[in-house]
Image (cartoon, helix red, strand yellow):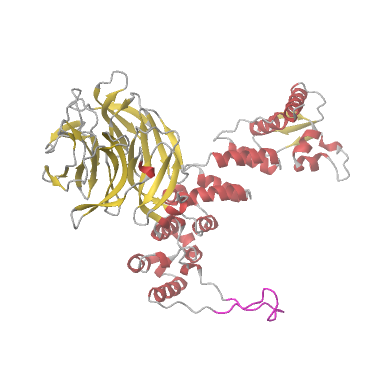
Amino acid sequence: LDPRCELTLLQDGLKELLNENKFVDCTLKIGDRCFPCHRLIMAACSPYFRELFFSEDGKEKESSKEVVLDDVDPNIMDMIIQYLYSAEIDLTDDNVQEIFAVANRFQIPSVFTVCVNYLQKKLSLSNCLAVFRLGLVLGVPRLAIAARDFIADRFETVAAEEEFLQLAPHELLALIGGDTLNVEKEEVVFESVMKWVRSDKAKRAKNLGEAFECIRFRLLPEKYFREKVETDDIIKADPELLKKLQVIKDVFGGKLPEKKPKEKKEGEVNGEAGAEEEEELLPGYLNDNRRLGMYGRDLILMINDTAAVAYDVAENECFLAAMAEQLPKNHVSLLLWNLFVILKLFYLIQLDSIAADWRAMPPMPSPRCLFSMGECANLLFAIAGKDLQTNESLDSVMCYDTEKMKWHETKKLPLRIHGHSVVSHNNLVYCIGGKTDDNKAINKMFVYNHKQSEWRELAAMKTPRAMFGAIVHKGKIIVTGGVNEEGLTALSEVYDFGTNKWDTFTEFPQERSSVNLVSTLGGNLFAIGGFAIVELEDKNIGPSEITDVWQYEEDKKTWSGMLREMRYASGSSCVGMRLNAARMPKL
């Protein structure tokens, strides 16, 4: 017989005994409610009840037939008793912490474990601080560590919450002391601590000395230290902190404090195990180990139908950002705040770069292909494209609100197109080029102002084109390649927002369509992949995908080949994104 089946039969039997009030030998009384149960079951599940019902020699205590429990919600206790008999409990975000506390009080490890698992699985920005504090209060290291790690990964966001200011001193120190804090700058830690102190200055100023040990002042820019730390009124009012500031200033000047040998414990002599001379460690405020979040790099993220791969051009290294086995090749990618968003036909998914996983978002109501995406003020816009059923070009624009997580239709484009490009700049969305239903490439450009719900036509490109690369780079729109009635083109153009004019830009080295243009935060412009007409293996001339990488050299005004073949670029959409190389496996 399957052991799982035996367990189910046992639980069913126990539940039946409880429901039919058979062999009941004790009652738990909470307020005006009574809960009949079996002492043997309660004792087997809880050391607390075992001690309550039985003496040390195992004999039953006669006085234990009715037990009064104070300061307990009867509904919570009812749920726990039902769980002990059935292994079923309906945990929710509203009741889990109370059930957890009762299970801890009455030493019921099975319920305790179920609650810990639930809270770990449900960790979110809205509850992580509460769960962290709960884990500390109840002495559950596993839960406290899981919540601490979650907070460390999202420290800057969590530190901005009002609840962060309610942390006790020991809770704050437990969060800010570790190497795993995901902050790019130590300024974030210092400012979070000072904000916490100022929220209750009278009580917390005395804790600043301890907090100083967790702030890595040597990672601060010296100018910031002089202007923000040395001039802070709370710090200047504390003589002990001023001494530490002087030590830090000496370190900035190149003078580290001398390390003294550790004092030997009484009875230790040279040669004893562990009695070797050791130098004292530097104080915590002189720690210069980088935090985990300080390994960010400006990378090119390539998303294909198998994986999202981050490429460091300077170091010629690739990292796995996330697997992407469910993505088709015909998708569109867009960078929005720190998250990467991909739309495929009508499914919307989002890359959580911390968890290295994808999150499903509400699907777009109208499936389409050959569309393009723009953004402004936490809104995504899926613009025009081709209807999958009729194969006709569209003029509709679907808008997704990332805060409300809802789609709605907004102002239509003035004409029906597909194969166009879209870029965003200063909360305006620009729709460029594309093809009409008669398969003619156009050179028109329209700008959308969402606040005014208005499309306006701007200056047209010199060359009509569709299926081309477009990007905002250093405050200007750059377009490269594409296809029109004459075939593929290598022509490039640049648009000046201030003058509303297009000018010629450096021609790409090869006539090509569907090239990915990427502008990194470091100010570099790259062109990746695309399709060109080449001689195929059978000696015929035809279109073929190219997976090379080019960089535009501003000083020489030329395109320079960086990599002849980047296998992860095949079928990829590409964006420039700052990612943490220390969090991703190297390929």
* Frontmost residue, 140 versus 407: 407
Where residue 532 sits: x, y (%)?
A: 25, 38
Quarter of the image holding residue 460? Answer: top left
Quarter of the image holding residue 387? Answer: top left
Work out whether 476 lies above or below 443: below
Specify whether residue 450 is in view.
no
261 within the magenta span: yes
Magenta stretch, main secondary structure class: loop
Work out whether 263 lies above or below 452: below
Residue segment shown in magenta? 260-278
* Frontmost residue, 421 versus 359: 421
513 within the magenta span: no
Q: Is residue 206 left or right of residue 474?
A: right
Q: Is residue 121 left or right of residue 440?
A: right
Name the residue at the front extreme: 539
Which residue does the image show at 56% across and 33% down from the upper left? 92
